[in-house]
Structure formats: structure tokens, C-alpha cells
Image (cartoon, rainbow, N blue to C red):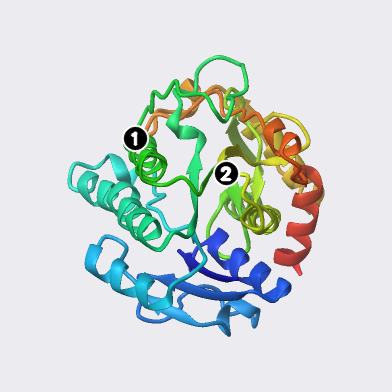
């Protein structure tokens, strides 16, 4: 099986390429830079074929994918700078990447009759209430530009293809790139106390674990919408920070605050990021390990 992966310089794309190598699949990575710009850790992703591709360039996407002719495209590339997406001069760029770029890929997948995996987000919902979001829920009410454009990407996939997996994730962390854990560790080194919101609830997603699940998925024809975060229960960012410091051996004091007390960010954030993952088990997929276990494994890597 030949698998084309976009966004390999990001957290998830990096781990997807390594998972493909572990299983002996032919993986071709891509990103917008002329050469691979992700972490140079000697892992398989740095040794596998790499193609420079601007997914907003429809002709380039068509030519590249037709030449490679993959069996599967795992589309990890996205504009993920949530606050910056709200800037007036960035909105169309964000839409070009998250919606237009995704549609460019979906149209070629349709032409080639290949499977497509689209990575989406809990931000397609309104983030209200306390009920976990069902993967097949169509009550979309994105609360910011990022969420709206990711929803447009979802629709570009579902309207053009039949052989697709739309996988929503939340609170992502991985070795290759910036994330909440790395930020909290850096802050904890230089501050005695840190203020963290307690009223935004969800579950973290470790890209190493997610990559395994995604390859499990493309080995099947169990298409549709899925939610995939780590197991271990729903928590707040405050809870997550406390566990990060506990496992990392920090004595930094964590002070819980409301979103309002913390201060308004440029983009609205969801209070309810609870994603219902039960469809994974119903369709025979192995759930991700607990986020506590994932955090432990992750800290061993980044702390040495």
C-alpha cells in the first residue's frame, strides 16, 4: 500500500510517517517547504521520500498526486494557529489552506479512487454544554475562523468522496513541534506559580498513538466520521497541567482560573471539547491508551 502524507513537518504527520515505516508501507511525505523542516531525530520520516507541495495550488496537487498515484492520502496539513486565523489579513489564507487545499486533495482522490483521511477538530462544534460530541452529529456551529474553515474542509471531503475517514481530535501533543505540554514545562522552569483555565474540558491526543490508529483505519473500509483522543477521562487544562508537573517532578504551583479570569483570547475557545470515542470500539478499532500513560511516555522522550 502506497500512502501519501501531507503536513509531515508537523506533529502528527511526523508520527504517521514513522508508523508507516514500522509496518513496511511505502510512505511519501509532503509539506510546503522545499526540503523537510521537521525535527531531525534520525527516525524514518527523515529517510523516506519527500515532496514539496503547496496544497492551495490546485494544479500542483493534481500533478503530484497523479504522478505518485497513492492508494491512500492522509491529510495532516492545516493552518492551526487559532488566534492568528482571526486577523483580517489572514482569514482568506486560512480558508485557502484548510478548505481550499483540502478540496484540491479530495477532488484528486476522487479521480484516482483512493482513500482519504482528513484530520479535523472539536472546533467544528459550538463548544457549549457538557454532553460529549457524537462523531455523526451534524449540529455544526463553529465559534471561530479556524473551526469554520476546518468544517469547510470536512464538507469538501464528505461531499466529494465515499472512501473517506474524517477524524476529529483535540488538545494535540507530539515530539515534532510546539504544544501545550512543552509550553507548560518551559513556564514551570521559570515561574513559581502558573494560572491555568479550569472551565474548558476535553481530552489530550498524543500523535504517536493517533498515528497507529490512523494506519489501522486505512487498512479497512470502515469509512465515516470518528473521534479519536486518548482514553483516561475528560479533564480541564488545569487538571492536565497538574499532572504534567507531577509526572515531570516540578513543584510549580498551579492556580485554577476561569476563562474570563484568564483573559479573552483573540479567538473564542470551546468550553466543551468532550469527544465521544465509542464509535472506534463499535467498529473494531483499538482505542488510544490513557492520556496519563501517553503523557508518561512522552515526557520520557522529551526530557531524556
Rendered view: 145 above or below 191: above
Q: Nearer the viewer, mark 1 or mark 2?
A: 2
Q: Is residue 238 left or right of residue 13?
A: right
The residue at which mark 2 appears reads as: 223
Q: Badge 2: few (under 14), some or many (20 or more) residues near its Cα, within 10 Å?
A: some
Which x, y percent locates residue 5?
49, 66
Which label was assigned to residue 148?
Answer: 1
The answer to which of 219 and 15 lies nearer the viewer is 219
Residue drawn at x 46%, y 33% as measured from the top left: 123
The answer to which of 189 and 180 lies nearer the viewer is 180
Which x, y percent locates residue 147?
39, 36
Among the 4 quarters of the image, the one containing residue 62? bottom left
Q: Secondary structure at mark 1?
A: helix
Residue drawn at x 58%, y 24% as measured from the top left: 133
Q: The C terminus is located in which quarter?
A: bottom right
Residue drawn at x 63%, y 44% as measured from the top left: 222
The answer to which of 121 and 191 lies nearer the viewer is 121
Q: Is residue 10 left or right of residue 1?
A: left
Q: Badge 1: few (under 14), some or many (20 or more) residues near its Cα, within 10 Å?
A: many
Which label was assigned to residue 281?
Answer: none
Rendered view: 278 above or below 286: above
Whole-number angstrom distance, CA of label 1 to CA of label 2: 23 Å
How many numbered marks, from 0 up? 2
Q: Closer to the N terminus: mark 1 or mark 2?
A: 1
Rendered view: 299 above or below 41: above
Which x, y percent locates residue 234?
70, 29
Please report contact status of discs 1 and 2: CB closer than 8 Å, yes or no: no
Amino acid at each position: 500500500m502506497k500512502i501519501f502524507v501531507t503536513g509531515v513537518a508537523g506533529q502528527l504527520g511526523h508520527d504517521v510517517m514513522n508508523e508507516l515505516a514500522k509496518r513496511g508501507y511505502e510512505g511519501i511525505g509532503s509539506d510546503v517547504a522545499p526540503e523537510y523542516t521537521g525535527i531531525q531525530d534520525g527516525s524514518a520520516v527523515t529517510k523516506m521520500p519527500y515532496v514539496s507541495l503547496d496544497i492551495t495550488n490546485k494544479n500542483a496537487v493534481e500533478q503530484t498526486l497523479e504522478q505518485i498515484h497513492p492508494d491512500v492520502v492522509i491529510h495532516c496539513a492545516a493552518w492551526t494557529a487559532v488566534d492568528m486565523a482571526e486577523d483580517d489579513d489572514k482569514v482568506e489564507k486560512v480558508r485557502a489552506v484548510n478548505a481550499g487545499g483540502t478540496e484540491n486533495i479530495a477532488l484528486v482522490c476522487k479521480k484516482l479512487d483512493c482513500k482519504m483521511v482528513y484530520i479535523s477538530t472539536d472546533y467544528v462544534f459550538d463548544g457549549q454544554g457538557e454532553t460529549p460530541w457524537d462523531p455523526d452529529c451534524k449540529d455544526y456551529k463553529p465559534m471561530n475562523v479556524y473551526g469554520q474553515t476546518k468544517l469547510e474542509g470536512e464538507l469538501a471531503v464528505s461531499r466529494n468522496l465515499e472512501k473517506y475517514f474524517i477524524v476529529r481530535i483535540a488538545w494535540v501533543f507530539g515530539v515534532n513541534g510546539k504544544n501545550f505540554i512543552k509550553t507548560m514545562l518551559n513556564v514551570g522552569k521559570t515561574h513559581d506559580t502558573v494560572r491555568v483555565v479550569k472551565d474548558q474540558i476535553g481530552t489530550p491526543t498524543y500523535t504517536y498513538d493517533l498515528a497507529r490508529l490512523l494506519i489501522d483505519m486505512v487498512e479497512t473500509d470502515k469509512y465515516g466520521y470518528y473521534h479519536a483522543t486518548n482514553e483516561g477521562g475528560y479533564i480541564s487544562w488545569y487538571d492536565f497541567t497538574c499532572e504534567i508537573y507531577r509526572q515531570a517532578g516540578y513543584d510549580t504551583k498551579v492556580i485554577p482560573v476561569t476563562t474570563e479570569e484568564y483573559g479573552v483570547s483573540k479567538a473564542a475557545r470551546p468550553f466543551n471539547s468532550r469527544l465521544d470515542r465509542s464509535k472506534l470500539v463499535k467498529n473494531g478499532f483499538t482505542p488510544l491508551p490513557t492520556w496519563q500513560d501517553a503523557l508518561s511516555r512522552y515526557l520520557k522522550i522529551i526530557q531524556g
